[in-house]
Image (tube, rainbow, N blue to C red):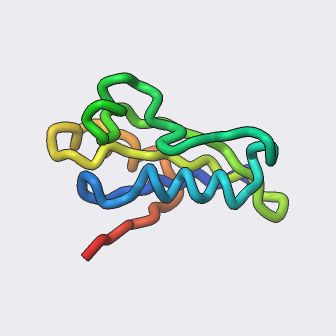
């Protein structure tokens, strides 16, 4: 358990949470060089892609210096606040993304 961290990324709707996760996955070399991961890797729901927002929380794990980091991409719209609140009870910390 010592080498596992659970973090959530929180921000208002359309402030770049999913884009940040995309870039973290690409920077972590989770895909082969010949593999086109595309954008909005975690937003695989048709409605999410159509509207351009995260509706359902999703998680992905990366390893960094021997630590397994579980990253949870949360919805940003106020209508989904209950899901975000539930997620925050399960994580060790958060990344607060502010887009001014």
- Which picture quadrant has residue 24? bottom right
Query: Is 11 situated left or right of 34 in this image?
Result: left
Identify the residue at the far right of this view: 66
Q: Is residue 70 left or right of residue 62?
A: left
Q: Position of residue 83 (x, y in %)?
A: 30, 37
Considering only vertical position in the picture, is 50 above or below 38? above
**Residue pictured at 58% horizontal, 58% vertical:** 23
Query: Could you tell me residue 92's position as x and y percent?
Result: 53, 57
Q: Quadrant of the C terminus?
A: bottom left
- The residue sitting at 40% across, 42% down in the picture is 87
Q: Give the quarter of the image for residue 47.
A: top left
Residue at x-position 44% and y-position 50% = 18
Residue lying farthest to the left in this orientation:
79
Q: Quadrant of residue 98?
A: bottom left
| Position above or below: 9 against 90 | below
Q: Residue furthest top?
A: 46
Q: Is residue 55 left or right of residue 21?
A: left
Of residues 34 and 83, the one nearer the viewer is 34
Q: Provide residue 84's location: percent of width, then percent of height.
A: 32, 44
The image position of residue 97, as x and y in percent, is 37, 67
Number of disc labels? 0
Residue visible at 62% across and 47% down?
Answer: 70
């Amino acid at each position: 358990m010592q080498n596992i961290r659970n973090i959530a990324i929180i921000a208002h709707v359309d402030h770049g949470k999913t884009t940040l996760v995309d870039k973290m996955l690409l920077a972590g070399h989770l895909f082969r060089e010949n593999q086109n991961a595309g954008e909005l890797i975690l937003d695989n729901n048709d409605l999410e892609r159509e509207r351009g927002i995260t509706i359902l929380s999703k998680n992905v794990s990366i390893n960094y210096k021997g630590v397994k980091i579980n990253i949870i991409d949360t919805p940003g719209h106020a209508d989904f606040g209950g899901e975000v609140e539930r997620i925050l009870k399960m994580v060790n910390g958060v990344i607060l993304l502010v887009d001014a």
